[in-house]
Image (tube, rainbow, N blue to C red):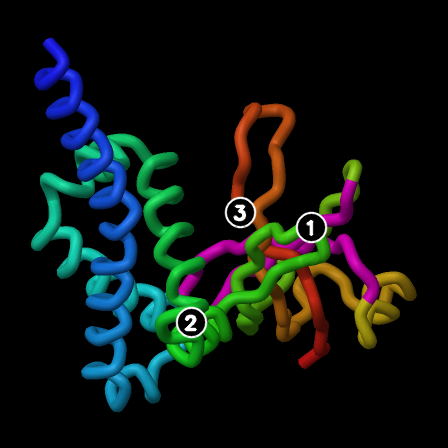
Amino acid sequence: MKYIYLAFLFFFSFWNVTAQELIDVVTAEVCSCSELKKEKLAGLKDEKLQFELGLCILASYSKHTSEIKSTYGDLLVEKDKMEKFGGDIGIKMATICPDKLLYFAGSMEFDDDDTVVKSNSTIEGKIVEIKIDQFATIVVKDKNGRVHNFLFLNYFDTASLFTNDEIKKNDFISVNYSESEIYDPKNKEFRYYKIISGLEKK
């Protein structure tokens, strides 16, 4: 019985060390993958850059699937487990390849509460509606016929175009915006909203 206990203790200790070292191995592979892709990554931004990082993580995941499942669970089924795995890689990248982490992080922004904010983008189009509810929303149709809803939440340099009623329905405008994850109390879920950070009348 004593030997069985010692064997179990040895196995548990070995598994625990393996679990701790697993993220080191995966992160090292992700850093190496990123280094090999550095010329390609230099010309990418935002979603495409994040996609390439995802491919590096997926390549390492495919090599260590059973170990990762044992430690984190099934990442392809449980979203929170996938977020935990990605977060652990990000933390470890800060020590193994901080330059790569900063490069990927540069394609995203964070607000004061560490809420993820997707980096700035610009859309041009015609105002089809201005809705005033709890918050003001400017509805814009772009040149491809797609309709976008932009929330007017924060102050920015050209905010007076809206507050002074200098833009109206059917005006053509350029909207600079970021996407922020905000809780929707009506649907009881977090959703990404386009938040206006700049306006220009055409």
Identity of the residue drawn at 33% across and 36% down: 81
Image quadrant for the N terminus? top left
Element under disc 1: loop
Image mark for residue 113: 1
Image quadrant for the C terminus? bottom right
Q: CA distance from mark 3 to mark 2?
A: 23 Å
Q: Who comes first in sequence, dot 2 or dot 1?
A: 2
User: Is residue 76 visible to the viewer in this orientation of the structure?
Assistant: yes
Residue linked to disc 3: 192
Identity of the residue drawn at 63% across and 71% down: 176
Residues at discs 2 and 1 in contact (Cβ within 8 Å):
no
Magenta-highlighted residues? 135-155
Residue linked to disc 2: 101
Element under disc 3: strand
Identity of the residue drawn at 35% across and 66% down: 50
Q: Amino acid at mark 1?
A: Asp
Identity of the residue drawn at 65% across and 73% down: 173
How many residues crowd mark 3 within 10 Å: few (<14), some (14–19), many (20+)? some
Q: State the image coordinates of residue 116 (x, y, percent, origin top left).
A: 56, 54
How many residues crowd mark 2 within 10 Å: few (<14), some (14–19), many (20+)? many
Magenta stretch encompasses residue 116:
no
Q: Nearer the viewer, residue 64 or 55?
A: 64
Q: Is residue 157 left or right of residue 42?
A: right
44 in relation to 70, above or below: below
168 in relation to 35, above or below: above
